[in-house]
Structures are given as structure tokens and as C-alpha cells.
């Protein structure tokens, strides 16, 4: 039997537990620790980094690790499982967590067609921001559900249920009381079909609201901390057959300028012929 006559799948998946870039008070790179990248043929890859503290006390963690599996499931579909974890996180003594877990599973049908994705297993453990314990309330219906062996008949960016949730979330963020103007620019476009088509992707969040946040400091999944910056939780971006999850992303613009991401995983891939 000539195996090359069968359909093949080109895997593509990456995991980056933590990394970043500061521009103030000086140019500083926070290297990506514990990152993994899956071979195009699939298989398994993992990486880990033990206790780390940045020389300038910007970022520290007890452990960062990632793991990716690319395999054929029992039903014959191509499945990619991406896990990205940080334990004992501390960013400038402002953002802390015992554990941040990003879990992303993407399954492509063996006969070709549109994939389905799941973020089950993603979570925050004992997250504190500015000394306050924050409970990110995760939605149970971020992504469309499909029974085992069943796949969507359209790309996720055209799924009405998914789009409805993304649009509703955008409206809640941009219409929130005291929401700054930059939030409307950042998320308002999601409500426009033309803008979504032009950008080619849709953005939403696993997080519906932040319990414990000080009044006027949070807007859906976004939290603003004076003299620090903005914190984005559970960001999910998807375009056609590509999916990316980032559990925490920081945009700092005060004494320390820079960006840091924690718990990122992404996956896509394609089959042929």
C-alpha cells in the first residue's frame, strides 16, 4: 500500500508559558521560558524551566512548562493538544498567581473540513491583582459544542452562536460604566461585520467578569490598575482554522513600560489533498 495516497495533515502548534518586553525604565527582554513548538509531522514535545527571577525584579516564577501532543484520535481525526503553565507567578509584586493554565485542544476531521476547538482545563488559581484576590468568572459556552465524531459545517468565524457571544461581550465592555475611550476603539470593531471581515479574525475572552475587582476598575475581562497599566484575562483569538489563547496579558504604561504574556497556546494546521 502506498501511504502517500492517503490524506495527510500538517501540524502547527506552539506554547509559550511566559515572555515579554519592557521599554522603560530601560530596554529589557523577558525571554520565553519553557516554550514548545510541535514538529510538522506531529508527535510530542515538552519543555520546562525551574525557578526564575529577572535581575531587575520585574518578573519571577517557580516553574514554567509546556507540552504539545499531535496525534490521530481513535475516530481518525487529527488532534492537537496544547498546554502552557506558569506556577508561582509574580509580576512587579502587582500580578500574582499560584498557577495559570492554558489548555487548548483542536481537532481536524480526517475527511477534510472545519475543525473544532476546546479550552476545557484552562484556569487561574489564586489570582491576586494589586493585593486583591480576583476570581475570573469563566464562561461555560465560549466555543460551540459538537458531539464526538461530529464537526462544524462552517468556520468558527462564521458560527452565529460564537459571533453572538463575541459581539455581546464587546458591547458589555464598551458600554460599561466609566469605560475609557480606548476600550471602545480596542473592542468596538467586533460588533461590525465589515470590520471583522477586513481584519480576518474574531476576538473574545474566556472571562465574563472579574469578581472581587474594585468598583470602576474592571470592564468585562479587562482590569485597569492606576500607576501600573491594563490587564487582559483569558483572551481568545480565532481566524478561519487558527486558534490562540492567552490567559494573562499585561500592557504596562507607568514607571514600567512594556508587555508580558502568561499562558499562551496556539494551534492550527491543514490537511491535503
Image: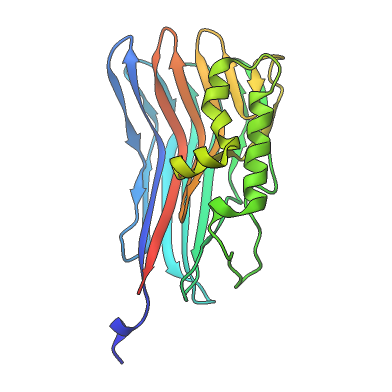
Q: Is residue 265 left or right of residue 49?
A: right
Instruction: Locate the C terminus by quadrant.
Output: bottom left
Image height check: is 62 above or below 215? below
Image height check: is 128 above or below 82? above
Tell me what residue is drawn at x 47 percent, y 74 percent. Answer: 110
Q: Position of residue 18 (x, y in %)?
A: 41, 34
Instruction: Locate the N terminus by quadrant.
Output: bottom left
Q: Nearer the viewer, residue 88 or 144?
A: 144
Q: Nearer the viewer, residue 134 or 97?
A: 134
Q: Position of residue 153 (x, y in %)?
A: 58, 66
Instruction: Confirm whether residue 34 shows in the render.
Output: yes
- Count up the numbered dots: 0
Q: Position of residue 116 (x, y in %)?
A: 55, 60
Image height check: is 156 above or below 232? below
Q: Nearer the viewer, residue 47 or 187?
A: 187
* Figure quadrant of residue 218: top right
Q: Is residue 269 left or right of residue 40?
A: right
Amino acid at each position: 500500500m502506498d501511504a502517500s495516497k492517503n490524506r495527510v495533515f500538517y501540524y502547527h502548534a506552539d506554547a509559550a508559558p511566559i515572555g515579554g518586553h519592557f521599554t522603560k525604565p530601560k530596554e529589557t527582554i523577558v525571554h520565553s521560558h519553557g516554550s514548545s513548538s510541535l514538529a510538522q509531522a506531529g508527535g510530542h514535545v515538552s519543555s520546562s524551566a525551574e525557578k526564575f527571577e529577572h535581575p531587575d525584579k520585574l518578573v519571577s516564577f517557580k516553574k514554567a512548562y509546556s507540552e504539545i501532543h499531535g496525534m490521530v484520535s481513535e475516530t481518525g481525526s487529527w488532534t492537537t493538544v496544547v498546554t502552557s503553565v506558569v506556577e508561582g507567578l509574580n509580576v512587579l509584586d502587582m500580578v500574582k498567581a499560584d498557577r495559570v493554565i492554558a489548555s487548548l485542544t483542536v481537532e481536524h476531521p480526517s475527511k477534510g473540513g472545519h475543525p473544532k476547538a476546546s479550552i476545557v482545563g484552562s484556569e487561574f488559581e489564586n489570582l491576586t491583582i494589586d493585593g486583591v484576590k480576583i476570581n475570573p468568572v469563566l464562561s461555560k459556552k465560549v466555543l460551540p459544542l459538537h458531539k464526538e465524531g461530529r464537526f462544524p459545517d462552517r468556520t468558527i468565524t462564521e458560527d452565529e452562536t460564537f459571533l453572538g457571544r463575541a459581539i455581546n461581550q464587546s458591547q458589555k465592555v464598551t458600554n460599561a460604566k466609566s469605560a475609557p475611550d480606548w476600550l471602545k476603539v480596542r473592542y468596538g470593531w467586533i460588533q461590525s461585520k465589515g470590520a471583522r471581515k477586513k481584519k480576518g479574525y474574531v476576538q473574545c475572552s474566556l472571562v465574563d467578569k472579574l469578581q472581587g475587582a474594585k468598583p470602576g476598575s474592571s470592564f468585562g475581562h479587562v482590569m485597569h490598575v492606576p500607576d501600573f497599566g491594563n490587564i487582559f484575562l483569558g483572551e481568545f483569538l480565532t481566524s478561519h482554522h487558527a486558534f490562540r489563547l492567552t490567559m494573562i496579558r499585561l500592557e504596562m504604561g507607568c514607571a514600567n513600560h512594556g508587555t508580558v504574556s502568561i499562558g499562551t497556546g496556539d494551534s492550527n494546521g491543514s490537511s491535503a489533498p
